[in-house]
Image (cartoon, helix red, strand yellow):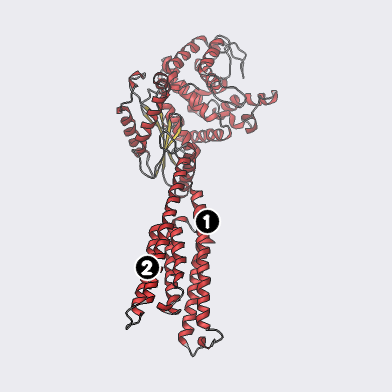
């Protein structure tokens, strides 16, 4: 809404400027009348220094006011400085009108109405309070002038009586006009809130979240400031809605919205991102502070009683939270959101009701890598970032495959070494896509035969990329063979049955399951139930039977956490 506010201020400035220019025009007529006094121009000769100096002082003031006006409108100064410039400008106008009145007859001047111009302009621009101040200053000036300059021997001061009425006009101009401006601003604010806020929770909505996120990230990138991102999702919310009804579900969302609204600073952006998911942007906040805030929030929600929560799978209504931070764990806004989303996935799939901070699989790999190989690992991470940028599907797919692989490894009780190799292989299995044209990766229809042959090269390309990294030798088979089929009809080497390494057979099941349950340009997304049926259908042909059975158990046991996609 920042752009709309700027546009509104510019329009007001244009209207006010027209009013002020009109007042300058009237004032110029006054000076011309009194300086030249008809055809007598002798008054501005050097022999009449008073008139000469007065004339040029007036000209200087006119140009000064015009200069300030031109700065505030033509050069479009920052909105945060408009009030300061307007205050200085209005004070100069008041001073100028005082000079005009003193010059045109003091208490007998017929031009005291000029104050109306600045009263109207100030009230429109800065509201009732500032308008009333200018009206009181103007009224005080003309009434004091009447008292000081009035006839000493006359019992009646006609000018004072007339100017009391004029003072009333000043006040009555500022008051109703200011009240109207106030009502108009409140109405505009209400409309903006309706456009920006989620009607159920009172938090910012999805659209405003992205507008604010974009603005905060631009400032942070320029000034190198920290930005923390928190994503929050209600655990088993579908179960809660199914058992208690959507009306009670709405009450839960409203209550959590209130908790969120009261848990963060005024300049933090707290939004309902969609459904049961919430997003919080924390400018100038470290990861440690964000973790403390998130954990405090998780605990508060867990301790809050929600009607019907005893029917939840864990007996309480809880939330899972993911955190990431710019610039340490993300280079831009897209990476910041995606990494926080990945952390949220991990929180939901590893027990739920917990806070997870984003960690990269390759960062974990660095810990186990010799110093001289660190640069290679960093390069691989860069390649994966490039792939993510090329293929909008790859990022989420890789992170989900890693999560599924962890769960399957635990189900099959792999030892630490094999579990680590499976996870690293899952993370890097599509690294060969770096050499696949973007047009093929993102094509919105089935690939041609030639395009398919190019796509099939990604497994070979991936193995080539990491074959010189000694610490990654054991995961080369996972990258090279994750598209082999149990019946020997896969690629690139048509391996069959147990000739396919065991970890590769695991990765194949996980990879295919996520491909089936994800939105892809050329594939209709399957539900979990449909994907499980497909896995069972392909037992013994495309997949290892025992691994399919184990993975199906993992999905069934965790399906409430995953949510129906």
- Mark 1 vs mark 2: which is more N-terminal? 1
Q: Which of 185 and 330 is in front in this view?
A: 185
Q: What element carries label 1?
A: helix
Q: Which residue is drawn at 40% across and 61% down?
A: 172
Question: Would residue 260 be found to the left or right of residue 38 on screen?
Answer: left
Residue that badge 1 annotates:
11
Closer to the observer: label 1 or label 2? 2
Q: Nearer the viewer, residue 141 or 268?
A: 141
Q: Which of 69 and 361 is in front in this view?
A: 69
The image position of residue 325, as x and y in percent, is 42, 39
- Residue farthest along the bottom direction in this orientation: 47
Residue that badge 2 annotates:
137
Q: In this view, does 366 lie above or below 311?
A: below
The image position of residue 292, as x and y in percent, is 33, 36
Q: Marks 1 and 2, Cα distance to the nearest angstrom? A: 27 Å
Question: Would residue 276 be found to the left or right of residue 380 on screen?
Answer: left
Is residue 20 in view? yes
Check whether the beta carbons of the residues at disc 1 and disc 2 lie within 8 A of each other. Answer: no
The image position of residue 231, as x and y in percent, is 42, 33
Q: Which residue is drawn at 37% across and 63% down?
A: 133
Is residue 81 in view? no
């Amino acid at each position: 809404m920042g752009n709309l506010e700027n546009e509104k201020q510019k329009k007001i400035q244009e209207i006010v400027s027209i009013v002020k220019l009109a007042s300058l025009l009237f004032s110029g007529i006054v000076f011309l009348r009194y300086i030249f006094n008809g055809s007598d121009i002798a008054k501005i000769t050097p022999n009449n220094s008073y008139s000469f100096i007065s004339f040029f002082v007036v000209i200087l003031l006119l140009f000064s006011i015009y200069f300030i006006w031109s700065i505030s409108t033509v050069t479009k100064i920052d909105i945060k400085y408009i009030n300061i410039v307007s205050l200085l400008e209005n004070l100069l106008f008041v001073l100028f009108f005082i000079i005009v009145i003193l010059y045109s007859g003091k208490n007998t001047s017929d031009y005291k109405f000029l104050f109306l111009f600045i009263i109207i302009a100030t009230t429109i621009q800065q509201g009732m309070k500032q308008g009333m101040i200018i009206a009181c200053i103007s009224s005080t000036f003309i009434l004091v002038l009447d008292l000081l300059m009035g006839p000493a021997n006359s019992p009646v001061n006609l000018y004072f009586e007339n100017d009391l009425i004029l003072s009333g006009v000043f006040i009555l101009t500022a008051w109703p006009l200011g009240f109207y401006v106030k009502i108009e601003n409140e109405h505009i604010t209400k409309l903006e809130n309706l456009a920006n806020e989620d009607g159920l929770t009172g938090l910012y909505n999805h659209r405003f979240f992205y507008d604010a996120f974009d603005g905060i990230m631009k400032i942070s990138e320029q000034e190198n400031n920290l930005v923390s991102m928190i994503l929050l999702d209600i655990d088993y919310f579908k179960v809660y809605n199914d058992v208690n009804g959507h009306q009670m579900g709405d009450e839960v969302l409203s209550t959590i919205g209130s908790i969120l609204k009261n848990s963060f600073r005024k300049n933090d952006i707290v939004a309902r991102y969609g459904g049961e998911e919430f997003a919080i942007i924390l400018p100038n906040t470290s990861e440690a502070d964000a973790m403390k805030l998130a954990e405090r929030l998780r605990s508060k929600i867990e301790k809050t009683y929600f009607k019907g929560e005893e029917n939840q799978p864990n007996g309480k209504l809880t939330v899972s939270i993911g955190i990431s931070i710019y610039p340490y764990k993300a280079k831009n806004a897209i990476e910041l959101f995606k990494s926080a989303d990945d952390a949220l996935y991990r929180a939901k799939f590893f027990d739920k009701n917990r806070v997870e901070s984003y960690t990269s699989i390759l960062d974990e790999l660095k810990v186990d890598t010799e110093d001289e190989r660190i640069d290679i690992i960093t390069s691989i991470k860069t390649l994966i970032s490039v792939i993510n940028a090329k293929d909008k599907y790859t990022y989420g797919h890789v992170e989900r495959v890693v999560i599924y692989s962890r769960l399957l490894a635990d189900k099959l009780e792999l030892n630490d070494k094999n579990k680590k190799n499976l996870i690293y292989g899952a993370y890097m299995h599509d690294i060969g896509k770096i050499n696949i044209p973007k047009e093929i990766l993102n094509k919105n229809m089935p690939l041609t035969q030639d395009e398919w042959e190019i796509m099939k090269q990604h497994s070979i390309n991936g193995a080539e990329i990491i074959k010189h990294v000694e610490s990654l030798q054991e995961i080369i088979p996972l990258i090279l063979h994750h598209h082999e089929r149990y019946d020997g009809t896969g690629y690139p080497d048509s391996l069959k049955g147990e000739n396919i390494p065991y970890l590769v057979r695991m990765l194949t099941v996980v990879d295919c399951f996520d491909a089936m349950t994800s939105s892809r340009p050329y594939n209709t997304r399957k539900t979990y139930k449909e994907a499980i049926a497909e896995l069972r259908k392909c037992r013994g042909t495309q997949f290892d039977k025992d691994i399919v059975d184990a993975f199906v158990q993992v999905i069934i046991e965790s399906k409430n956490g995953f949510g129906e996609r």
